[in-house]
Amino acid sequence: MTAIIAAIANLKGGVGKSTTTVMLADGLSYFYGLNVCVVDLDAQANSSQMLLTERGVQMAYEQGKGATHLLSSFIKGEPANVADFIMPNAVSLEELRIAEENDDRLGWISSLPSHPHLRLQEMGLEETWYSQAGTPTSLANKLAEHFKTGFDVLREYYDIILFDCPPHLSPLARAGLSLSDVFVMPTIADAVSTWGTKQFSDWVGANVAPDLPSRNFVLITRFRNTGYSKQIANELQEVYLKDRWFGPKIPESVHVLNAMERAAPDSYDTFRGKYGGVKGDVKRLSERFTDFLSQQRAGRKWQKMRD
């Protein structure tokens, strides 16, 4: 089976898109032994820093790896050889590293990282494109067309490809959504986020793909166990997005923040050591998400490799 592409996206910032991306990558690779590729399309490069560290992101950029160099291929009219821009090792879990050293790979994470230069590069492309009477939609379509061949090849080597999208509707973000089979929408249980989440989901259906909202996995992050948060979460599930799949509520916790910090590009931690008090939440997230993917792939069931 070829890889499923999942975009992690929401127009609202600060809802945990990059954190969700990393938790999914770790959970799917650790519990299910999946080969995961994280593609960071956000110039903030948060998920890239979480996986590679800030120094690792800069090293990748200097080595000609990452989204900036992929976008350059479009600007220069060169083939989108996506595999050439990937950092093959973005693993931070000790269990995955040891299995690899023993020639018994059981789950892996690679990264096509971002870099802050990406936004400047994308802005320059937009200015040139629009000066020639192009539109944001036509640019997004051309980017998706250019990248599709490269990612179609990549599908043969991975089980799942995660697109970490920026919190705005840039042509690059829209291209990522249009290439995706499903999309994951993290949100927060408050009134403003609820309204924005519904609006964004409707926009995706109207402007990217009519059936993509029906392939939408919603995740409530930074959840506080209060009456107000429970009420908002219930409204999301029972009223606003009642036809969507929902993952477990991820609590607001210092354990989540600590898990996203990697000391050095060559440092590793056990799954238990990395996630501490939220390891059960990451497990439930991966379980629920694989159930969701099974529905998308006509009943295909992913088997657990670790527990």
Image (cartoon, helix red, strand yellow):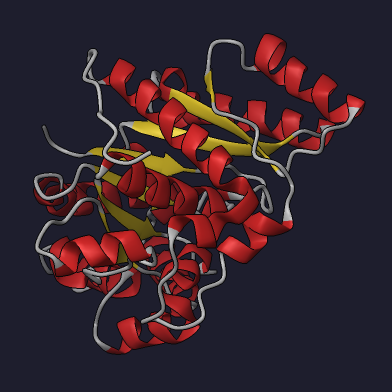
Say left or right for 201 vs 13: left
Q: Quadrant of the C terminus?
A: top left
> Is 242 or 259 nearer to us in this picture?
259
Residue 93: where, in percent of width, then height? Answer: 38, 63
Residue 136: image location, x then y, percent: 44, 50
Q: Is residue 226 above or below residue 63?
A: above
Identify which residue is drawn at 34% across, 48% down. 30
Q: Position of residue 170 (x, y in %)?
A: 49, 54
Where residue 148 appears, as percent x and y from the top left, is 18, 47
Asked if residue 197 lies left or right of residue 123, the reply is: right
In the image, is residue 251 above or below residue 299? below
Quadrant location of the N terminus in the rendered image: top left
Residue 179 in sight in this render: no
Q: Is residue 215 left or right of residue 285?
A: left
Q: Which residue is found at the position 55% from the left and 55% from the top?
A: 275
Q: Residue furthest right?
A: 227
Please state the total of marks drawn on the protein image.
Answer: 0
Q: Nearer the viewer, residue 199 or 48?
A: 48
- Asked if one can make out residue 236 in the rendered structure from this viewpoint, the answer is yes
Image height of 216 relative to 114, above or below: above
Question: Which quadrant would residue 130 be assigned to in this image?
Answer: bottom left
The residue located at (32%, 41%) in the rendering is: 306
Q: Residue at x 30, y 31 (%)?
A: 181
